[in-house]
Amino acid sequence: MQRHYGLTGPGTDDGVFSIEKGQVISGYPVGIMLLNVWYPLLPGNVVNAYTYDFPVRMRVVPGSNQERMHGGDPTLLQDLVDTARELVAEGCRTICGACGYFGHFQRQVADAVDVPVFLSSLMQINWIKAAMGSSRKIGLVCADKPSLTPDIWESCSVDPTGCVIEEIPRGGEFEAILHSDRGSFENSKVRQQVVSTAEKIVREHPEVGAILLECSDMPPYAADVQRAVNLPVFDFITMIRYAHSAVAQRPYTGFI
């Protein structure tokens, strides 16, 4: 497929442009694959369009839910591949996920399409580690620790050695997100659980030099986490912005 990567505008819009037959929309550099969930999707959430200052195209993966995705259900693979290909056909130049456990399928989906694929926030682990001193660790706040199985690390091509992994405690308000069964939650309580989990990591492991929020529902609280632990905080949105910057480069202008 011929894909137009250049920025168009005054002085850059001459010449011949082409598009694949069947593509009836344009201007969405980032495609995001979603789960079928039932709870509020706040600004900052991967699935809220106000999170971004660039266009994103979102599409629900048929038959998907948290149980199947967290468990890496292999029968989801074809629907994931089909959804990714549909987004690419609509002009998306990178494909991202909306749940850290999409990482079970990272390698297979990347092999199935011809654009960069960033399905899980976990993909940032290696370069966060490379950016810090060798004695420092990453504090990983996750939604479902048992689902971080060896295959998800392998699929995402990351090494979890040096990560301190802490799950959001069960029994609190975050359960409304984890179970996706009531369509509401008390935001201050969810915020408190995310922040206190990060604080626990740093309190018990002073060698932690950065926090990674695994879950796509945690970025709305990233600033609160950073204020509480006074460390760099990475999440799904840092990854998606990174992906966007690579496929939607803009020329620099200014005075010399």
Image (cartoon, helix red, strand yellow):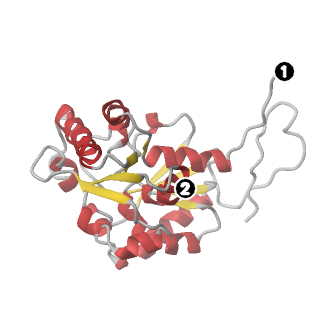
Q: Nearer the viewer, mark 2 or mark 1?
A: 2
Q: CA distance from mark 2 to mark 1?
A: 35 Å
* Residue 73: quarter of image: bottom left
Taking the spot 37% from the left edge, 41% from the top edge, the residue there is 219
Task: Let me know if residue 34 appears in the view.
Answer: yes
Q: Earlier in the sequence, mark 2 or mark 1?
A: 2
Secondary element at tag 1: loop
Residue 110 % position (x, y): 56, 69
* Residue 67: quarter of image: bottom left
Residue 16 % position (x, y): 87, 50
Taking the spot 37% from the left edge, 37% from the top edge, the residue there is 222
Pointer 1: residues within 10 angstroms few (<14), some, or many (20+)?
few
Pointer 2: residues within 10 angstroms few (<14), some, or many (20+)?
few
The one nearer the camera, 92 or 120, is 120
The one nearer the camera, 99 or 58, is 99
Secondary element at tag 2: helix
Name above or below for residue 60 compared with residue 159.
above
Residue 255: which numbered mark, if any? 1
Q: How many marks?
A: 2
Residue 130: which numbered mark, if any? 2
Kind of residue sitting beneath label 2: Ala
| Left or right relative to 23: residue 210 | left
Residue 29 % position (x, y): 62, 48
Residue 13 % position (x, y): 84, 39
Residue placed farthest to the right in the image?
A: 15
| Callout 2–callout 1 Cβ contact below 8 Å | no
Task: Let me know if residue 211 appears in the view.
Answer: no
Kind of residue sitting beneath label 1: Phe
Query: Which quadrant holds the N terminus?
Result: bottom right
The one nearer the camera, 129 or 235, is 129
The one nearer the camera, 129 or 50, is 129
